[in-house]
């Protein structure tokens, strides 16, 4: 499998020559990157080589089947290569529907919801935010009192990261050398990004184009750092690349099933690190004072944000209709404003995200839901330690989205 893994890495690097967003992280042999830069395979050659590589994957032996991770590794390589081929076809001009694209690239399809699905939540928000103006205007006005001032942003994030890291290290053994740095950037279509650099190091960037609200401190500290993307990549490097010698995990192709696991665990990790009311308590007692905000409003803000978070799938619907040609940009912005409670500026930024990352949006909400169901299905108890155990097992494995265990739907 070593030669198979090497060929896989080089094919991912080759696709990166045609799409600068494709290779999200690489810390394998630098000479492979130099070789790829020099060869610059055509997209047709990449597709043919990927097809051959799938055919060349050896069958599992009886001994292999005794190691779950070995079984998962083979399935992972097949599905990652299939997604690579789909992405190459898209680079060559193939146009898939939103759902076909997400199935091909991320091994999952998000449920479809009509506008009426979100109306009950919007009515609850109407009650919490009474007034005569449009609901989004009332919501935006309400949120103004929860913006982290620019001069307090860095120290507020630092406090959040310290807490997220401490909570993670209480349950997860990480290499002593793990570390990261933070940069504050502008002119991006995303709010935060983790650039994993290998050797247990990450660069975390926070976009300051738009106001940053107090809840984003924990969101970004967990999602990009602990126990999110940074921990995910550190564990893959430690457990699979270094301990097992599986070099294919030294590269991360963004438009692939791996991303649903990465984003889903990063979002669900917030609940794992801050179960129950612990998040609101920490924000009220530590982050609000650090940001110079009034902590007496923390509980009400949490109630409002809990409702707004129920509207996350409205973003998928906007992306689905926009990318399927049913919405133009103006219509997508209007939908996001009405049903996802995004300000017009935030909604416009989100459509730019659709332009670049397309159906990738399902990885955040559907990914989180699938990860949550998988961990709850695998955990016979609600004890936090059991949840952490299953969470870490998932982080340090090559499990695919279609391989996540989910609870059966209750009888109706």
Image: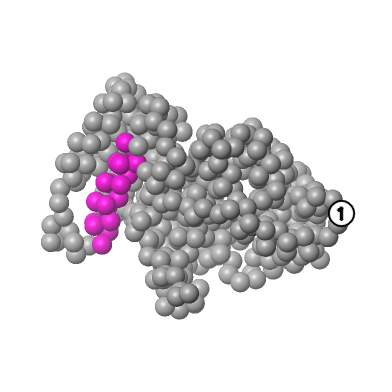
In the depicted structure, whether residue 7 falls above or below residue 374: above
Residue that badge 1 annotates: 132
Count numbered badges in the picture. Answer: 1
In the depicted structure, whether residue 342 falls above or below residue 40: below
Q: What residue is at 84 percent from the left and 50 percent from the top?
A: 133
- Residue 185 covered by magenta stretch: no
In the depicted structure, whether residue 256 falls above or below residue 299: above
Magenta segment: 68-85
Would you say 104 lies left or right of 178 here? left
Q: Where is residue 244 in the image (x, y as percent from the top left)?
A: 26, 53
Residue lying furthest right:
132
Within-10-Å neighbours for mark 1: few <14, some 14–19, many 20+? few
Closer to us: 155 or 349:
349
Q: Position of residue 395 (x, y in %)?
A: 41, 58
Residue 208: name its quadrant: top right
Would you say 174 lies left or right of 58 here? right
Q: What residue is at 65 percent from the left and 50 percent from the top?
A: 340
- Residue 75 covered by magenta stretch: yes
Q: Where is residue 111 in the image (x, y as percent from the top left)?
A: 49, 55
Closer to us: 82 or 332:
332
Q: What residue is at 67 percent from the left and 58 percent from the top?
A: 119
Would you say 52 lies left or right of 405 here? left
Residue lying furthest left:
62
Q: What residue is at 60 percent from the left and 51 percent from the top?
A: 314
Closer to us: 297 or 368:
368
Q: Is residue 175 visible?
A: no
Q: Can residue 41 be seen in this view?
A: yes
Q: Position of residue 400 (x, y in %)?
A: 35, 54
Would you say 267 lies left or right of 35 here? right
Q: Main secondary structure of the magenta part?
A: helix
| Colour convention of the picture | one colour
Residue 373: name its quadrant: bottom left
């Amino acid at each position: 499998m070593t030669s198979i893994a090497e060929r896989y890495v080089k094919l991912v690097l080759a696709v990166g020559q045609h799409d600068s967003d494709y290779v999200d992280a690489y810390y394998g042999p630098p000479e492979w990157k130099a070789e790829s830069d020099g060869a610059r395979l055509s997209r047709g050659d990449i597709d043919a080589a990927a097809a051959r590589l799938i055919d060349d994957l050896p069958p599992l032996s009886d001994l292999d089947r005794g190691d779950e991770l070995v079984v998962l590794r083979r399935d992972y390589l097949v599905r990652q290569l299939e997604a690579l081929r789909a992405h190459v076809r898209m680079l060559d001009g193939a146009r898939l529907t939103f759902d076909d694209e997400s199935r091909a690239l991320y091994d999952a399809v998000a449920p479809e919801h009509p506008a009426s699905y979100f109306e009950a939540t919007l009515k609850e928000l109407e009650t919490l935010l009474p007034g005569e103006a449009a609901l989004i205007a009332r919501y935006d006005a309400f949120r103004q009192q929860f913006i982290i001032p620019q001069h307090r942003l860095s120290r507020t994030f630092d406090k959040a990261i310290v807490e997220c890291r401490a909570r993670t290290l209480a349950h997860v053994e990480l290499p002593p050398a793990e570390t990261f740095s933070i940069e504050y950037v502008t002119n991006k279509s995303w709010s935060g990004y983790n650039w994993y650099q290998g050797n247990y190091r990450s660069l975390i960037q926070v976009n300051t184009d738009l106001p940053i609200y107090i809840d984003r401190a924990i969101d970004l500290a967990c999602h990009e750092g602990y126990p999110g993307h940074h921990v995910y990549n550190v564990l893959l490097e430690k457990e699979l690349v270094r301990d097992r010698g599986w070099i294919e995990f030294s590269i991360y192709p963004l438009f692939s099933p791996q991303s649903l696991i990465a984003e889903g665990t990063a979002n669900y990790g917030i609940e794992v690190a801050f179960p129950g009311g612990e998040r609101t308590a920490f924000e009220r007692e530590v982050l609000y004072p650090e940001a110079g905000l009034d902590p007496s409003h923390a509980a009400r803000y949490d109630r409002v944000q809990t409702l707004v978070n129920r509207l996350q799938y409205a973003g998928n619907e906007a992306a689905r209709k926009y990318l399927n040609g049913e919405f133009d940009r103006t219509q997508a912005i209007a939908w996001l404003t009405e049903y996802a409670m995004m300000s017009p500026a935030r909604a416009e930024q989100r459509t730019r995200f659709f332009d670049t990352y397309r159906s990738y949006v399902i990885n955040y909400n559907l990914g989180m839901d699938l990860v949550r169901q998988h961990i709850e299905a695998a955990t016979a108890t609600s004890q936090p330690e059991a949840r952490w155990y299953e969470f870490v097992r998932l982080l340090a494995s090559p499990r695919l989205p279609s391989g996540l265990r989910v609870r059966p739907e209750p009888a109706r």
